[in-house]
Amino acid sequence: MSSAAMPPEGEILYEASGLTKEYDDGRVPALRGIDLLIRSGEFVTIVGPSGCGKTTLLNMLGLLDCPTAGTLRFRGTDLGALSDPASYRAREIGFIFQSFHLLPNFTVEENVQIPMFGLPGSAAEKRGRAAKLLASVGLAHRLDHLPVKLSGGERQRAAIARSLANRPAILLADEPTGNLDSTNSAHVMDLLLRLREEHQATLVMVTHDHELARHASRIVRIKDGEIISDEAAA
Amino acid sequence: MNFLQVIFRGLWRRPVRTGLTVLGIAIGIAAVVALVGMSAGYEKSVANQLDAVGIDVVVSNLQGGIMPKAFAESVRDEIASLPGVAEANATLMQMLSVEEAPMMVVYGREWDSFTWDQLRVIDGRLPRDAAENAVVLGKLAAEVLGKKTGDRIQIETGDFDVVGIVDGQSVLENGAINMALPRFQEVSGYEGRVNFINIRVPDNADQSRVEALCREIEARHPGLRAVRAGEVVGTSQGFRMARAMSWSTSLLALIVGILGVMNTMLMSVFERKHEIGILLALGWRRARIMALILCESAAMGFLGGVVGVALGALTLAVLERTPYVRGFLEPDLGWVLAAQAVLIAVAVGIVSGLYPAWRSSRLSPSIALQG
């Protein structure tokens, strides 16, 4: 396990050990024995060529997928032994996807409220928080619009607002600017960095864009399902 | 935003398909309401008729189905002589096609018996005696047949004078043709035979004595059943058969409804795999996703039930005016049947949603997100 870029003061959030994922009865290895430590407050980018296992690793951190072998601990708890992974996602994780993944039949404001289901707070409080989050990403005027009426950049800003709705400890972003032009890409990245600071969230971002990776405090490079380097960003 | 809004947003995403599925359930429920309402209406008509005539015990051979088999008229005299019988008279009742009317109830009533008493003459008069070649029509029967006092009417092999129009105080009575028993026996080929004996007991007779009388009649006349008026509908094999047929036909309609909803919900789960993946990624529990699918299908059931009850009520209202039904029974759609129908529809929705809900709960979030 490499620890070259770890801020020594941060609490250990993730501790992956020998994390392996195989598909098709072992014929297709996606991750091969990943060891990784992520501390609270870090901004980690995972970079590598297409098909190297970046998204698979991110999915495992978000418990969207299960490892074939190895262990993954979150704040010391073995995530593989969790009886209620949904609760972990609802309380701790905020997802940002390349394709935005907004629900098309819900307004922008409603989309932001979706992760708040089952969380404490009145309907009015949740509506207020959604509106506030959307205002913070510059979409106060788009609350009642359906996602289809939004531009790509606006959709991703709405998705970023949604990812913060449940006050997550960790933001997991999978190629968040992958579907955006360079101008929108820069805006979204600036927004993401600002909100990460404001909400004091740990950010783990998958990207194949080395320019974007430079924003991170730490860059983890993956190739063929293995970590080939883990170092502080220049 | 609350869970209910999420449910209806899910249904609204494919309004035509949701509408057609709701219509499918509604047709099934309308069939339940119409068939069961007709069957219940017929039972109610008979109960009302017995009540209006003031009959305490009915003796008949109900093994033949809806229309009892005829038996010897002489049984009436034997029963009349039993202790505990205040009055007994015989009736021959048949359902016949009369002129243009496809089905009419025709009564041959024993002359001077109490069964004539509840017929209130609203036009003309009653027959003068048992020998007069005359009939009186219930007011609905007159309307259906298009007859008035003074007209002639052909029943089986006989031609009769319509001498009066009467209000029989129940739909079955109002929809019937009435004549003296001997003339009806003659024209219908049932000479010396009847299919009902109507008994009145003394006013002070308690239920146990009436019950004892029924058992004594049955012991003396094997093959006949003596039933207290209030129990005629519940114990009749014919009514039970009609009820069973209406429910079993309804069941077929409901099975079609279940398959329709299941197909819709399966399609919905298949199409919304991506959406379900998003919800799972955003922290929704599998149980909540299952509840969402089940609630959506239950909501379709509920809507189908409400629309179905309205359609069923409309069907009954139309049927009530058709020549086949008019004056023959009064369809009965009470709150109980309406509530039962809606509950059945909701149950149909839930049952139909179980498998799609289970399927949705098996989705892997990462695979579902790929769509």
Image (spheres, coloured by chain):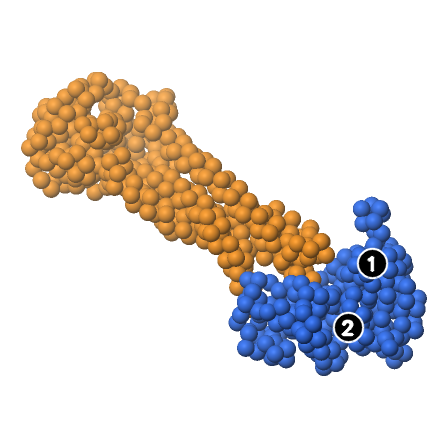
Chain colours: A blue, B orange
Mark nearer the N terminus (1 vs 2): 1
Q: Residue at x 17, y 34 (%)?
A: B145
Residue B247, image x, y percentages:
44, 38
* Local secondary structure at mark 1: loop
Residue A212's label in the rendered image is 2
The local secondary structure at tag 2 comes to: helix
| Residue A84 position in % (x across, y down) | 74, 61
Identified by mark 2, the residue type is Leu
Residue at the image point whose x is 54% and y is 47% from the top: B264
Whether residues under marks 1 and 2 lie with C-beta atoms below 8 angstroms apart, the answer is no
Q: Which mark is residue B124?
A: none
Say if residue B274 shows up in the picture. yes
Residue B285 appears in the rendering: no
Position of B79 compared to A95: left or right? left
State the residue in front, B307 or A179: A179
Crowd rating for badge 2 (residues with CA inside 10 Å; few <14, some 14–19, many 20+): some
Q: Residue at x 51, y 54 (%)?
A: B14
Q: Residue at x 39, y 30 (%)?
A: B237
Q: Nearer the viewer, residue B103 or B54?
A: B103
Residue A85 x %, y %? 74, 61
- Which residue, given by chain and number where applicable, does mark 1 sit on? A52
- For disc 1, the chain is A
- Give the chain letter at badge 2: A
Q: Does A89 appear above or below B100?
A: below
Tell me if residue B211 comes above or below residue A216 in the rendering. Answer: above
Image location of residue A144, percent across then percent down: 52, 72
Q: CA distance from mark 1 to mark 2?
A: 18 Å
